[in-house]
Amino acid sequence: MRRVLAFRHVPFEGLGRIEPELRERGIQADYADLYQPGAPSPDLANYAALIVLGGPMSIHDDLDHLRREESYIREAIARGTPVLGVCLGAQLIAHSLGAEVRKNPVKEIGWFELNLTTAAQHDPVFAGLGPRESVFHWHGEMFDLPAGAELLASSRRCANQAFRIGRNVYGFQFHLEATPEMIANWCREDERSGDREFHDPIDSHAHAARLAVLSHLVFGRWCDNVVRRVIAERA
């Protein structure tokens, strides 16, 4: 069962750099677009892992599909299924487990330095990264750490940037998955929205080469964990 399920919230926020890591390991990804009317309800029993992607909406918006996703997240965690949340996805994981999600003091949009904690240096996914890395951010809210979570990264503007719960649950506030093309598209979508979140130009290629290295390492290790679990379950 080398298949993972990805909750997508808008058409322009997909798996990005996660997808080639999945493909390299023979893992197929299916999107569940629960925001679309009439979208079928997925069966988590058919999937080896769950990925919850980002989106421009708030965790506090009155959207039924976000509450449904939280229910799926809790189910996946109870099953011991690997779960990865990115930006809104990380906030959904935290909120589904009872942690508060609230406005960050400032919006982090662009390339900002990430500070890795001591725990990250010994983490199966983050070990080997530098103590500071420049990564891409686009968020106006932040999460408190859920009970039992270990803090893996922070930034000057946002205290909680990444966490791990147990062996299988990860939440990232930042966007390691973003390609330059995705970043440029997000900027165009923001401009078209009529409610722009930023006004200064963003160089989508600024740290893209290093981000590619980091995403290959981090997402590759996460995918390796999924494969190991699939093999162990078949044994």
Image: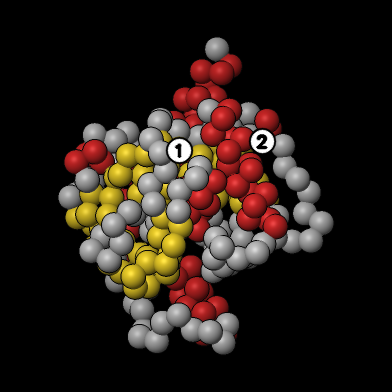
Q: Position of residue 54 (x, y in %)?
A: 52, 59
Q: Position of residue 135 (x, y in %)?
A: 31, 61
Q: Is residue 2 above or below residue 12?
A: above
Q: Relative to 209, is 49 above or below?
A: above
The amino acid type, in three-letter code, at marker 2 is Leu
Q: Which residue is at 63% across, 55% downward? A: 66
Secondary structure found at label 2: helix
Identify the residue position indicated by label 2 in the image: 44
The residue tagged 1 is 169
Quadrant, the C terminus: top right
Q: Element under label 1?
A: strand
Q: Residue furthest top?
A: 235
Asked if residue 220 shows in the view, the reply is: no
Q: Residues within 10 Å of mark 2 (few under 14, many from 20)?
A: some
User: Are the two marked residues, 1 and 2, in contact with CB atoms closer than 8 angstroms?
Assistant: no
Location of residue 167 (image quadrant): top left
- Give, as a three-letter code, the residue at label 1: Val
Q: CA distance from mark 1 to mark 2?
A: 15 Å
Q: Residue at x 67, y 62 (%)?
A: 63
In the image, 211: left or right of 53? left
Total residue callouts: 2
Residue 211 image-quadrant placement: bottom left
Horizontal side, residue 220 vs residue 63: left or right? left
Q: Which label is found at residue 28?
A: none
Considering only vertical position in the picture, is 171 above or below 48?
below
**Looking at the picture, how far across and down is residue 218, in whole percent?**
36, 44
What's the residue at 22%, 45% (across, down)? 117
Which residue is depicted at the point 64% across and 52% down?
Answer: 67
Is 88 rendered above or below residue 233? below
- How many neighbours does mark 1 have within 10 angstroms: few (below 14), some (14-19), or many (20 or more)? many
Mark yes or no: residue 190 visible: yes
